[in-house]
Amino acid sequence: MSIDKMKRDILNSPMAEVRGTDRIQQMLDRHDESFIKRMYQLMVDDEEVAIME
């Protein structure tokens, strides 16, 4: 998956809605590819936990 797709998915996630898309966008702009990949994985993990609950 491309970094751009990961960024779009992160910005469209419930996490971004709660924390604010502007704040998340600033964070994505400041950090490198490895940070974005870790953030994406955390988002996916959080969504899996929410589904199981």
Image (cartoon, rainbow, N blue to C red):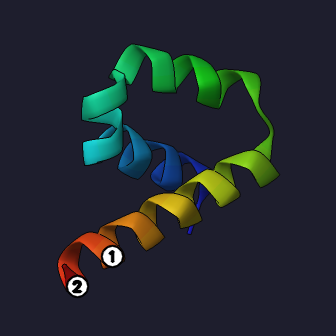
Relative image position of residue 40 (x, y in whole percent): 54, 58
Q: Secondary structure at mark 1?
A: helix
Report the amino acid beneath label 2.
Answer: Met
In the displayed structure, would residue 21 be above or below residue 33? Answer: above
Dividing the picture into quadrants, the one containing residue 49 is bottom left
Q: CA distance from mark 2 to mark 1?
A: 5 Å
Relative image position of residue 36 (x, y in whole percent): 66, 48
* Residue at 45% in and 59% down: 43
Question: Are the two marked residues, 2 and 1, in contact with CB atoms closer than 8 angstroms?
Answer: yes
Which residue bears the numbered disc 1?
49
In the displayed structure, would residue 43 be above or below residue 13? Answer: below
Q: Is residue 21 left or right of residue 28?
A: left
Q: Secondary structure at mark 2?
A: helix
* Residue at 76% in and 32% down: 31
Identify the mark at residue 20; answer none if there is no mark. none
Q: Is residue 42 left or right of residue 13?
A: right
State the quadrant of the C terminus. Answer: bottom left
Which residue bears the numbered disc 2?
52
* Residue at 67% in and 58% down: 37
Report the amino acid beneath label 1.
Answer: Val
State the quadrant of the N terminus. Answer: bottom right
10 vs 51, nearest the viewer: 51
29 vs 13, nearest the viewer: 13
